[in-house]
Image (cartoon, rainbow, N blue to C red):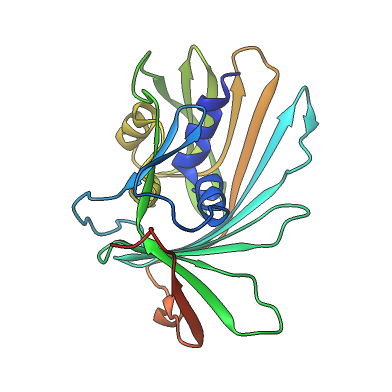
């Protein structure tokens, strides 16, 4: 499997890897720089667009190679969203949970440092977006909305299959829910626009999905849990009690 396609897919449904990379950057970096492998980080100057998904959920993602689960799997993403703010918490085996707060309207993002015995720290930087090299080139996925249905956590879902030369994505989509795909892409500023565009045509929120590469070697599974729609306590996004430090070279 092309790893850039896998990374693009994961960035579309969650910004775990991108935020982890930003959290590990040394201070003093310029506004635009490369992370290698066709990945560039740039200042986000896109116009503000309110989030369409308001609520929270927990998403568990598992990665397999030759039917063996990878060492860093599973990754758990907790997600809270208001109209103009997004808080995420990403955790994987052997690594501390990383929390990120993004202010879409003010174009700031904060990496909330793991709590120790000292003060609570938040590293502040101008909002960045991660851009993949030529993510929109190539074949458009072929999306099929099947007649198969099942109920997940009380939400009626339909089976959707997206096929491309890279592999097959199979998801169970809750048609009564707004999907966070477009919001997630704005938060990170990346993802495969081909899949995002086609999945936007299929209204709804995939509560479970599996992606298998064309060679049948790599596989990703994902499931959404603890889904709450339409309400988030404003205190979730508060920085009260945090000592905020702006990273040199990452501000205005």
Q: Going by the picture, which residue comes out furthest to the bottom? A: 241
Q: How many marks?
A: 0
> Residue 216 at what x, y percent from top left?
68, 16
Q: Is residue 99 left or right of residue 83?
A: right
- Is residue 102 something one can see in this rendering? no
Q: Residue at x 34, y 62 (%)?
A: 251
Residue closest to the eye, 226 or 76: 76
| Residue 158 in the image, given as x and y percentages of width and height | 47, 36
Can residue 186 be seen from the camera position used here? yes
Residue drawn at 50 percent across, 83 percent down:
242
- Where is 1 relative to 186, above or below? above
Left or right: residue 173 versus residue 187 is right
Q: Is residue 145 above or below residue 127?
A: above
Image quarter (top left, top right, bottom left or bottom right) of the C terminus: bottom left
Q: In percent of the image, x 37 and y 14: which residue is there?
A: 138
Residue 61 image position (x, y, % from top left): 63, 44
Up-down relation of residue 96 to residue 173 (above or below):
below
Picture quadrant of residue 107: bottom left
Work out whether 10 lies above or below 20. Answer: above
Residue 43 in the figure: left or right of residue 164: left
């Amino acid at each position: 499997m092309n790893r850039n396609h896998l990374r693009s897919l994961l960035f579309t449904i969650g910004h775990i890897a991108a935020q982890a990379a930003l959290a590990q950057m040394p201070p003093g970096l310029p506004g635009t720089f490369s992370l290698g492998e066709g990945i560039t980080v740039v200042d986000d100057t896109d116009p503000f667009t309110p989030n369409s998904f308001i609520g929270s959920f927990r998403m568990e993602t598992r990665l397999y190679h030759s039917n063996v689960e990878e060492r860093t799997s599973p990754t758990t993403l907790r997600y809270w969203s208001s109209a103009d703010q997004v808080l995420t918490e990403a955790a994987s085996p052997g690594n501390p949970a990383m929390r990120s707060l993004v202010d879409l309207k003010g174009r700031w993002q904060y990496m909330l440092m793991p709590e120790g015995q000292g003060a609570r720290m938040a590293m502040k930087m101008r909002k960045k977006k991660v851009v993949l090299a030529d993510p929109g080139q190539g074949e458009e996925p072929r999306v099929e909305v099947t007649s198969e249905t099942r109920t997940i956590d009380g939400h009626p879902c339909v089976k959707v299959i997206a096929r491309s030369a890279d592999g097959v994505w199979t998801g169970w989509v809750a048609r009564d829910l707004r999907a966070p795909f477009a919001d997630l892409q704005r938060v990170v500023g990346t993802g495969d626009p081909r899949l995002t565009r086609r999945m936007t045509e299929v209204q709804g929120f995939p509560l479970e999905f599996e992606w298998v590469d064309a060679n049948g070697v790599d596989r990703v599974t994902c499931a959404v849990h603890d889904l709450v729609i339409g309400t988030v306590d404003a205190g979730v996004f508060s920085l009260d009690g945090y000592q905020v430090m702006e990273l040199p070279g990452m501000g205005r």
